[in-house]
Image (cartoon, grey):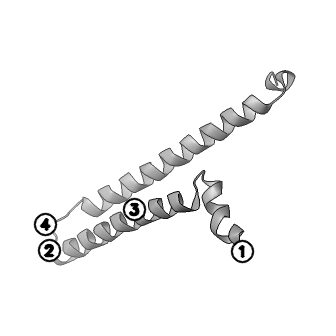
Amino acid sequence: MRDLFTKHPASVGETYLQHMGMAFSFAGWLAVAALAALVHALLPPLCEKTASRIITRLHDRMVQNRCRQNSSIGELLEAKMPENARRI
């Protein structure tokens, strides 16, 4: 049962609580983006790029976090590799 709550967060290099905090942060910004899109739907001159700008920033943040995680894993694996395997 515990695996249900920890497997995915661990796969992205986070604890359960860190992942929950990140997800809540994303949810909050997505709610702001949704509100901006609603305002734009009713009044087209307002919030013309707000929602798309928020989505772009969230995507960039997610990709940067993923790249940082992949870099850390790569460094860890290389450090544990025997010296002769690193030359391949």
- Report the residue at 62% width, 38% height from top: 72
Q: CA distance from mark 4 to mark 3?
A: 28 Å
Is the C-beta separation of discs 3 and 2 under 8 Å?
no
Mark 2 or 1: the one toward you: 1
Instruction: Describe residue 80's horizontal placement relative to residue 51 as left or right.
Output: right
Whether residue 80 is situated above or below residue 17 in the rendered picture: above
- Near-viewer residue (80 or 2): 2
Q: Amino acid at mark 4?
A: Pro
Figure quadrant of residue 85? top right
The numbered disc on residue 45 is 4
Residue density around tag 1, few if under 14, some if 14–19, many if 20 or more, within 10 Å? few
Mark 3 or 2: the one toward you: 3
Mark 4 or 1: the one toward you: 1
- Report the residue at 52% width, 61% height from top: 17
Give the residue at mark 2: 43
Give the residue at mark 1: 1
Mark 1 or 3: the one toward you: 1
Q: Amino acid at mark 3?
A: Ser
Q: CA distance from mark 1 to mark 3?
A: 25 Å
Instruction: Describe residue 45's horizontal placement relative to residue 8 as left or right.
Output: left
Residue density around tag 3, few if under 14, some if 14–19, many if 20 or more, within 10 Å? few
